[in-house]
Amino acid sequence: MNVIKLGGSLLDDPVRRAEALNAIATQWKQGEELVLVHGGGKHVDANLKRLGIPKRTYAGLRVTDDATLDVVVSTLAGSVNKMLVAELAAIGVRCAGVSGCDASTLTAEVHPEIDGVDLGHVGSVTGGDPTLINALLTGGILPVVSSVAEGPNGTLLNVNADSAAAAIAVALEAEELIFITDVAGLLDARGNVVAELHADEAEALLGTSVVTGGMRPKLQAALHALGSGVRRITIGEEGGTNLVAA
């Protein structure tokens, strides 16, 4: 079983998105068990702008007030999720779109304040329940999961899609977690792709300026998954960075 996280500009570029989905469809039709997890931050940004709702971030996280949460949920669990389901269906993949809050697939706690800043409805993933995903897979249906998590007391939380994918991979005891993104892999200080990285080397890199932007949460999520039993981690497209335990 492999968990694939699709994100970055791939979600915004119809051509590259089609290439990624066709590759997923080929693997699925060859009998591989797959789960697709996605974010959609740029789609959320576009919908916030269209509705006149200011975008606010702090420490790399989206400050998510009530109005922003409504847009996050409707975009990720709605339009982006169903776009992927429809496009996979068009190339012969029987799939179902679900969100992390369905059947407690993803659970999270409210993210603590950072420097006194309340992030609102932002969550830190605490676990996952694979029951729904396993039921879909048993029925021959590819699950497409959005990164909206179940919070405490009947709430919804906006969680990082990389963390969501890692939690799902751990819950499913997946063999591999693959981050398909808009970069070739983890780049070193000279801009070259790092072909293989040991976990201790990755930990050390997190303390440097080499790992920046969206690569930081990917690497953190990858390390969590690797330390929790997922055997292989790939960041980037084919020939990207392979993260190994030792």
Image: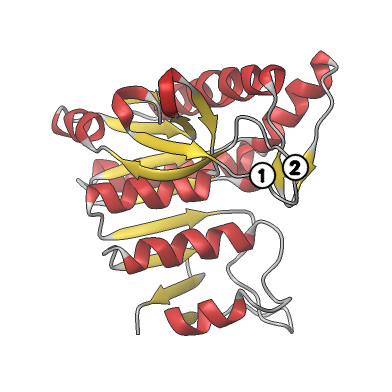
Label 2 secondary element? loop
In percent of width and height, residue 121 lies at: 60, 30
Question: In the image, residue 90 lies at what x, y percent?
Answer: 42, 24
Mark 1 packing: few (<14 Cα in 10 Å), some, or many (20+)?
few
Residue linked to disc 2: 117
Relative to residue 58, is residue 70 depicted above or below? above
Q: Which is nearer the eye, 75 or 101?
A: 101
Residue, x 44% and y 73% (percent of image)?
A: 242
Q: What type is the residue that disc 1 sits on?
A: Glu
Of 157 and 142, the residue lying toward us: 157
Name the residue carrying label 1.
113
Q: Which residue is drawn at 30% across and 53% down?
A: 170
Q: Is residue 12 left or right of residue 125?
A: right
Q: Is mark 1 on a helix, strand or loop?
A: loop
In the rendered view, would you say 245 is above or below 69? below
Mark 1 to mark 2 CA distance (whole Å): 5 Å
Q: Residue 201 carries which label?
A: none
